[in-house]
Amino acid sequence: MDNQTWSDRLANLTFSTQAVINGQLMDAISGKTFPCINPSNGSLIAHIAQCDEADVNLAAQVARATFDSGVWSQLQPAERKATLLKFARLIEENQDKLALLESLDAGKPISDTLGYDAPATARCIAWNAEAIDKLYDEVAPTTADALALVTREPLGVVAAIVPWNFPAVMASWKLGPALATGNSVILKPSEKSPLSAIFLAELALAAGLPAGVFQVLPGFGYEAGQALALHNDVDGLTFTGSTAVGKKLLTFAGESNLKRTFMECGGKSPHIICADTDKLQKAVDTALSAICYNQGEVCTAGSRLLVERSIYSEVIEKLKQGAANWQPADPLMTDTRMGAIIDEAQMERILSYIDIGKQQEATLLCGGQQVLQATGGYYIEPTIFVDVTPEMRIAREEIFGPVLSVIVFDTLEQAIDIANDTEYGLAAGIWTSDISKAIKGSRALRAGTVFVNNWDGGDMTMPFGGYKQSGNGRDKSLHALEKYTELKSTWIELG
């Protein structure tokens, strides 16, 4: 579609703004709403139902009754598979609308939401659906007078709290395995980007998912999110977001029913370019993409670029030239590569870190400014700091914006030490033409995912998650499905 077509579709876009409880669109019990703001121009999109503890109590009661009824949890695997495949097909059929909602709500370029977010959401649901009837339980090797069974059963009621940077994709990473294994799911989207979650629930109901199996509660973390984490009828809690919030959720789980809790949290990912790479231009282009894609609002953003000294000057010059290709623009323009920051608060946070970088005497190579102020939107140009030392705050703290810190190193061992000197461990990358260096380097990097001669490679077959304070548990792959189940041992004595 061309730019005018997307503008026309936006003008005629309709969407729901209520919670989804027991198969119905509902206002919050309190009647409260909160404003949903368009990041591209600061205008009001809609008022959204503001759910709190009362709505959580109702949704949890419905989810528990639905789970116990067996209408989904005890459904034949082939039937769950067929329903989820229909759900995936409906997402595909409605991917233009889903992409437009994501772009409108989160400031993401329409080329990204249409090229990645919408199709990836459908793929995730379909992939997990296809796995349902291909998973087998176990018979333990024991003596002839016993039969020992090792089986998996669904957890029960699962609360999923997802972030605003990839609203639909992150929701699908939770929904796919949780629904595939027979759980009832209560999804709390971020208050900054709630629209796609509500739409997904509507599509799931249209696909035949029973009422009460998948519910959506828009609202704030301190109300709906905290109530879900503390609720004794929630058996599992899955979260993607900041490390600070993740720690609070773990505390709430301990204060309540010790619910299974796993999460993917923050990152300060190191991206290493060695002098022996034969792909230097590609490495630099990828380094820019790794910090500018999705406005830098990516948990795996390659926010620390470690460059070997002998190529440092050349890399810096290439970075400066390449940054010009990542200037922010209207998200609904089809050639836009970088859109708007999610909201004013996040924009101010990013700008404050840019000031911190200057104060700590890093050299601002380019960028560093808010732009397109006349639009009323929240835009920051690509920002690159050089002469950064590992102890600087911009090199240690997650900024979640298009701000790159470039650090020089002399040996791979030094680069690994710098890379691992962080409380995080979500992702890391290394560019080298030496296969031994690539393997040894990837083994030494303390991160859940290591990219060699690429960044953000992978698909649904690969688990995703972090070391250290980047979280626990894993999204994607067959490893995700086991997280939403309980392991049961049954010992049968034979006569």
Image (cartoon, grey):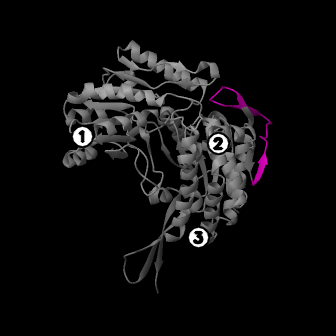
Quadrant of the rendered structure where residue 207 is? bottom right
The span shown in magenta is 22-44
Mark 1 lies on residue: 277
Proximity of marks 2 and 3: CB atoms separated by less than 8 Å: no
Q: Residue at x 38, y 41 (%)?
A: 427
| Residue hosting label 2 | 100
Q: Is residue 414 above or below residue 350?
A: below
Which quadrant of the structure image shows residue 17?
top right
Mark 3, other Cα within 10 Å: few <14 / some 14–19 / many ≥20: some
Q: Is residue 460 above or below residue 264?
A: below
Which numbered disc, 1 or 2, marks the residue that appears first in the sequence?
A: 2
Mark 2 surroundings: few (<14), some (14-19) or many (≥20) residues within 10 A: many
Dot label at residue 381: none
**Residue 69 x, y percent position in the rendering:** 70, 65
Query: Which mark is in front, 1 or 3?
Result: 1
* 7 relative to 349 in the view: left or right: right
Which numbered disc, 1 or 3, marks the residue that appears first in the sequence?
3
Give the residue drawn at x 64%, y 42%: 100
Q: Is residue 359 left or right of residue 82?
A: left
Label 1 close to label 2 by CB (< 8 Å): no
- When asked about the image quadrant of residue 405, the answer is top left
